[in-house]
Amino acid sequence: MTSETDTKPRVLVVDDAATVRLYHSSLLIEAGFQVDEAANGLEAVESAMATPFDLFVVDVNMPKMNGYTCVETLRSERVGTEAPVLMISTEDRPGDADRAYAAGANLYLVKPVAGDRLVRIATMLTSGKGTLE
């Protein structure tokens, strides 16, 4: 018999800003996801080596290991290679999204992201169905 938590998609929210982590985590938990948190890319990689995740929500600008390097490491280390990555950043310069996709992200969004949009995208990415918008 499987428990209810076994059927909920597991998400790792990675952001150095505690308020952003709490905001994203709260929205996802309320929507029925299991959520773990990491304060930087290094913590995220360490968590991913110990726990399988169905989705990574990753900030770009963080200490110790930025989001681009985090995603590249997840993909190159064969940890989290199947799980989609949603990168969310304040960076909106030409080339920022291209750099995220080159690192292995599935989608790049610019902050702030509306809560209902975050939940809708997380649901779509973890279900493998539907369209982004």
Image (cartoon, helix red, strand yellow):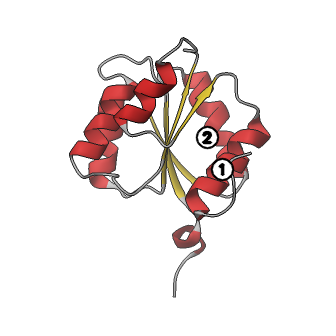
**Residue 74 located left or right of residue 84:** left
As rendered, which of 1 and 65 lies closer to the eye?
65
Number of numbered discs: 2
Q: Pointer 1: what residue?
A: 29
Tag 2: amino acid? Ser
Tag 1: amino acid? Ile
Q: Pointer 2: what residue?
A: 25
Give the image location of residue 30, x and y in percent: 72, 50
Dot 1 surroundings within 10 Å: few (below 14), some, or many (20 or more)? some
Check if mark 2's residue and mark 1's residue have beta carbons within 8 Å: yes
Dot 2 surroundings within 10 Å: few (below 14), some, or many (20 or more)? many
Give the image location of residue 1, x and y in percent: 51, 88
Which part of the image, by quadrant, shows the C terminus?
top right
Most extreme residue toward the bottom, as rendered? Answer: 1
* Residue 69 figure quarter: top left
Q: Secondary structure at mark 2?
A: helix
Classify 73 as above or below 80: above
As rendered, which of 27 and 127 lies closer to the eye?
127
- Is residue 100 visible in the rendered image? The answer is yes
Q: CA distance from mark 2 to mark 1?
A: 6 Å
- Is residue 46 visible in the rendered image? The answer is no
Give the image location of residue 100, x and y in percent: 44, 29
Classify 104 as above or below 17: below
